Amino acid sequence: MRYDEGHSEKTKNRVVKIAAAQMRKHGPDKVGVADVMGRAGLTHGGFYAHFDSKDDLIAAAVDRMFEESRARFREWTDGKDRPEALRSYINAYVSRAHRDKPESGCAIAALSSDIRRQGSKARSAYDRGVNSLLNSIASLLGEEDGVKRRTLAQSMLAEMTGAVAAARAVADETLSDEILASARRSLRARAGLAELQK
Amino acid sequence: MRYDEGHSEKTKNRVVKIAAAQMRKHGPDKVGVADVMGRAGLTHGGFYAHFDSKDDLIAAAVDRMFEESRARFREWTDGKDRPEALRSYINAYVSRAHRDKPESGCAIAALSSDIRRQGSKARSAYDRGVNSLLNSIASLLGEEDGVKRRTLAQSMLAEMTGAVAAARAVADETLSDEILASARRSLRARAGLAELQK
DNA sequence: CTTTTTATATGATCATTATCATATAATGAT
DNA sequence: ATCATTATATGATAATGATCATATAAAAAG
């Protein structure tokens, strides 16, 4: 049928959004083309009208995940001065809420061990996303020179993503909560934030 | 045939060792039973004489990975005094050598996003391994009380595993090297180690 | 009103993979 | 020597999943 202009693009966006959520939740390889299409209210056959291959979908989904990351970054930091924005970002990222919602969370924490097994398009999208996030974090740091800011941002990103990934991996909830709390505290300290409330 | 006593156990050990390597490299779900058996010089059919299911093999493989972790920990720290052992452990863990050999490296860095999708036996094995590793790290820390040592160990483990996982995930080798170097530096600093050489 | 267009549907194919029933071969026990 | 044992092999089954050829339906263009 001759749907109205832009219908195809809207459908594609919907499919990518669903794929981005499902892939963070279950891993890219555990999400089937037919399942994603089904969730979008479509059947599997139409898939190849939108994407060259499943790899292509994975790459689009990774891009989408990092777009969502940037939106969350803004949500958590907009309208706050630098230290407050940083504190807010750390607390929101290294949180139980984030841990419990991988499907809408950061791609780095969700795909940490999956992405290196993916195709080059997905990996490029991932690299772009990581760089973008590093820049965002560095922009919140008050260090003198840019090199130090970048170094600190990289180290903090490692701890943030490592903590959330580990907190998800561990089955014991007490241990999981502990890991998050320890990382949060350490991150605030080394970001130069004085401890206020808990 | 009536093989000599202990043949079965030796075979099983060999299979688990191979599975542990392959699963760290490719992810548990990407490693087939037939492939592992083939690498052990066997055919797929005999598998169920050794394991109840693939889940069972995954759990055994996870246990094995952490045994290897403990052996590496000893290798890197034995015969050194506490600060030197800690420095050695950090430098060896957060290294390009470790990054480039997931198949023989730490399970936490290798399976960070895979393990939460596995069965309960594998997850229990993982929890045991994480706790054991946390104790090992805490034993290297010179903090006053045990709580602080545990907190710091958790935070450091998050950064170490996060850095190695991220360094593997990223395609750009320059960025990957940078992430490792940044994490290494930060970890040594917050572990209270003075900077000596590079 | 007919034709063309195009997003989506149907249905098939081919590959992969976990699992299991059954067979085999070699060797200690009889 | 024959038998019983047992680790491993053969071969089948059933499920899943990516891909693709082809069909269809509905609206826009004529």
Image (cartoon, coloured by chain):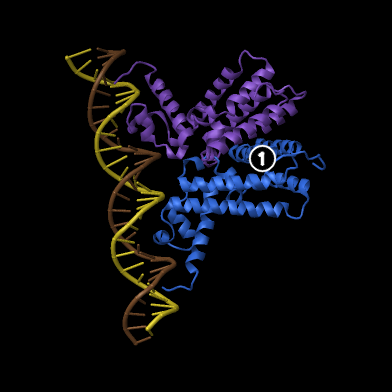
Chain colours: A blue, B purple, C brown, D yellow
Foreground of the two, C29 or D15: D15
Provide residue A125's location: percent of width, then percent of height.
52, 49
Which subunit holds the residue at mark 1?
A
Asked if one can make out residue B63 in the rendered structure from this viewpoint, the answer is yes
**In the displayed structure image, the side of residue A162 where residue A140 appears, left or right:** right
Provide residue A177's location: percent of width, then percent of height.
68, 39
Name the residue: 36% across, 35% down.
B34
Which residue type carries mark 1? Arg
Q: Residues within 10 Å of mark 1 (few under 14, many from 20)?
A: many
Foreground of the two, B114 or B8: B114
Name the residue: 64% across, 19% down.
B85
Asked if one can make out residue B165 in the rendered structure from this viewpoint, the answer is no
Number of marks in the rendered image: 1
**In the displayed structure image, the side of residue A97 where residue B102 appears, left or right:** left
Q: Quadrant of the N terminus of chain A?
A: bottom left
Disc 1 marks which residue? A150
Name the residue: 66% across, 31% down.
B156
Question: In the image, is residue A169 above or below residue B15?
Answer: below
Q: Quadrant of the C terminus of chain A?
A: top right
> What is the quadrant of residue D2 in the picture?
top left
Provide residue D14's location: percent of width, then percent of height.
34, 48
SS under mark 1: helix
As drawn, the residue found furthest toward the front would be A145
As drawn, the residue found furthest toward the right would be A196
Foreground of the two, B9 or A36: A36
> What is the quadrant of residue A147 in the picture?
top right
Provide residue A102's location: percent of width, then percent of height.
59, 48
**In the displayed structure image, the side of residue A95 where residue B30 appears, left or right:** left
